[in-house]
Image (cartoon, helix red, strand yellow):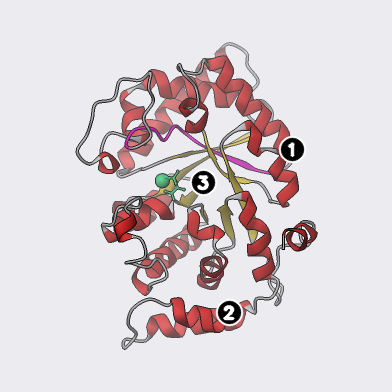
Amino acid sequence: RQEQYRALRDVPAETRDGVAVNLLMNAGLLVDLPQLVDSGAAGIGLFRTELQFMIASSMPKASEQERLYSAVIDAAGDKPVTFRTLDIGGDKLLPYLHQSAEENPALGYRAIRLALDRPGLMRTQLRALLKAARGRELRIMFPMVTELSELHRARDLIARELSHLTKFGHLMPRQLKLGAMIEVPSLLFQLDELMALVDFVSIGSNDLFQFFSAVDRGNARMAGRFDDLSPPFLSALKSILDAGTRNGVEVSLCGEMAGKPLAAMALMGLGFRSISMTPSAIGPVKAMMIELELAKLERLMAEHMADPRRQGTMRQLLTDFA
Ligand code: PEP
Ligand code: MG
């Protein structure tokens, strides 16, 4: 199997009926970088910057952050990299950052909520990213956005860093693209307004499904009880794709679903043309897609989702099709 997947590395990521889908990889540390070549990924769709912070025993210095980001951008060459700003708090605690215990950490003081309250932390990171990407394209996205005001504030912080660095003669990124992760259902009801503020969005389906279904993503007792291949959740994903198309904003998905061949197939059938996954999943997902008759699947899924008598998950229907 491993051998078979490796042989697919340089095979174009196209369905049997000729539709290209960008297969990107998730990463977070220097050790992940060789996978960019080994897996044949088209780029890094999610770089989890908090991992550097989580394995350190004290706050990584600005220079250390910049060095990591430069190494990532260098390793990627012409391939795009999307850096996610710090997603700490909740269950991702840093021993050297005082964080108090919370009753519902997943719903608490985390990610962009914490970052906006600690602009020193966020600005240091943004500055490190801007410096690391000198002369290159830089893509930054923010985790756990709930309200658009958070994005306005994050953009203001970036504008301040940009003008500061320009004043001191630093070479700026050739192009800067800003994105939001869609992980909180509140965004589903302001998609057009959201799309007006960003260049791209990436769906964090792990968290989005957790909040959509009110089910703790880490609770073994609830695992398997609700299915992300059910029409309500897939309709939510489809509404994001449609809003992206209406507004000319790129939509991708970077949760674990993307790396499971059956779920990846369903995502392609919904209309996703870019997904990001753990590097070891790229081979299996590509093996699935080169056999896939996408037009047939699109028809099957659209019909099923429009059928008022449909019930429950689409897993069996999708498995039978596969
Ligand atoms: C997600 O929530 O789907 C996601 C990609 O982010 P993380 O798994 O790091 O929370
Ligand atoms: Mg998440």
Q: Mark 3 points at which residue?
A: 199
Q: What residue type is labelled 1?
A: Gly
Give the image location of residue 240, x and y in percent. Answer: 42, 61
Residue 44, quarter of the rendered image: top right
Sequence-first tag of 2 and 1: 1
Marks 2 and 1 sit apart, C-alpha to C-alpha, by 35 Å
Marks 1 and 3 sit apart, C-alpha to C-alpha, by 21 Å
Of the pair 221 and 15, the residue shown nearer to us: 221
* Circle on res. 322: 2
Q: Name the residue under label 1.
A: 77
Magenta part of the chain: 79-90
- State the predominant SS element of the stretch in magenta: loop
Sequence-first tag of 2 and 3: 3
Is residue 300 within the magenta segment? no
Look at the image and tell me whether residue 189 can be seen: no
Find out whether the residues at labels 1 and 3 contact each other: C-beta distance under 8 Å: no
Give the image location of residue 164, x and y in percent. Answer: 51, 16
Q: What residue type is labelled 3?
A: Asp
How many labels, in total?
3
Q: Which quadrant, please, contains the N terminus?
A: bottom right
Q: Which quadrant, please, contains the C terminus?
A: bottom right
State which mark lies toward you, 2 or 3.
2
Q: Label 1: how many residues lie within 10 Å, few (<14), some (14-19) or many (20+)?
A: few
Give the image location of residue 159, x and y in percent. Answer: 47, 26
Find out whether the residues at labels 2 and 3 contact each other: C-beta distance under 8 Å: no
Picture layout, residue 317 above or below residue 125: below
> Is 134 positioned to the left or the right of 207 in the image?
right
Q: What residue type is labelled 2?
A: Ala
Residue 110, quarter of the rendered image: top left
